[in-house]
Image: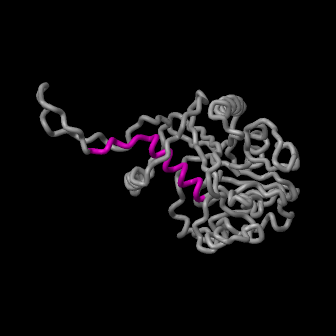
Amino acid sequence: GGLRQVVRVGTRRRSASGNAEGSSDTLAAMELYDLEQGLGSIASTGCVLNCQELVGLKAGMMLLKTREKFPEIFFWGKILGQELDYYLAYGMRDSEFEFPSKEFFYAGEDFQFKTLPRLTEELADRVIEVFAEKDMPFTGKVEQLLEPPADDADPPPDDDAEVPASDKPKPLTELERLSQVVQEIDFDTAAVPAGAYCLNEAHLVVRSSNFRGLGATEATALEKYVHFRPPTSVAALRALARSDIQFYSNFLDPLEKDLPRGCWAVRQDFSATLVTLRSLTWPGYCAFHVPGTLKFGGAYIGYAQKNSDLPFLL
């Protein structure tokens, strides 16, 4: 996801087509070298980063890129906490089939990025259950417990007795919640222009060499944007399974099918040189596209609180 494909942190290199990535003829994606430009494109939301944050992010993401040996590293967003904030980035790993996998990383005010663990389905369900009735803000401390530790009513065993292995699950921490929320936000957002990606002969999702940006008029149409993630709709899955996929490119879920209808707000600036898409489901997420160019991307900056009342407001 994440437009998040639009702020990319990386050095310029040659693509398969021979163009130097990072030039005006390539996709811009919230990577390191165009981070400021990408964030400037979504500044209309009122969510911005200061100079100290930008400098720290660039240094931290460059170290992360080198350490993890990513060809590109992307800024995902910032989750605001009561005491400290979380900065998030991700890299893309090639998979054997279709979609590349995203590896997420988080950092605090020291901008030293650490791996954000991917939760099992069981752990994710536990996090969702804990916060089903309450929507507490993040504290900014990954070790913060989400639930009180289980009380051990049994007396302590004798020193010579064998201690049985406990079947009780470990208490959830804010780190697990952070991982679950990032995955949920990324699934619901990650907006990109339709046609920016295609499947190659090996059935891998790659950037389309034929994409030259959306026109000024179609760039304001919600149906011209899709989610950059494995599709879930029946129509998109059928398209993904076709053998002539190079002629049938509708293999990504369109934003216009998202529920509730009207959960996206599309705006064009007065100069008609920039289009932004804001998620009303996740206030704080904003995607952008510069019509007629390969520049698009997005990021999330907010409290990670879902607008559950949205269906009753539209």
Question: On the rendered image, what quadrant is the C terminus found in?
Answer: bottom right
Spot occupied by residue 293 in the image (x, y as percentages of width and height): 86, 54
Question: By what rule are the colours in the image chosen?
Answer: one colour
Residue 228 figure quarter: bottom right
Vertical order, 155 against 274 (above or below): above
Residue 125 figure quarter: bottom left
Residue visible at 71% across and 33% down in the picture: 54
Vertical order, 30 against 68 (above or below): below
Q: Is residue 76 magenta?
A: no
Q: Nearer the viewer, residue 153 or 82?
A: 153
Q: Nearer the viewer, residue 281 or 91?
A: 91
Spot occupied by residue 116 in the image (x, y as percentages of width and height): 52, 40
Residue visible at 59% across and 53% down in the picture: 186
- Give the main secondary structure of the magenta stretch: helix
Q: Is residue 9 visible?
A: yes
Q: Is residue 134 visible?
A: no
Range shown magenta: 168-188
Residue visible at 78% across and 37% down in the picture: 33
Vertical order, 19 against 278 (above or below): above
Residue 278 is left or right of residue 304, and the answer is: right
Spot occupied by residue 262 in the image (x, y as percentages of width and height): 64, 69
Q: Is residue 175 magenta?
A: yes
Q: Nearer the viewer, residue 252 or 283?
A: 252
Residue 216 is left or right of residue 313, and the answer is: right
Q: Nearer the viewer, residue 310 or 11?
A: 11
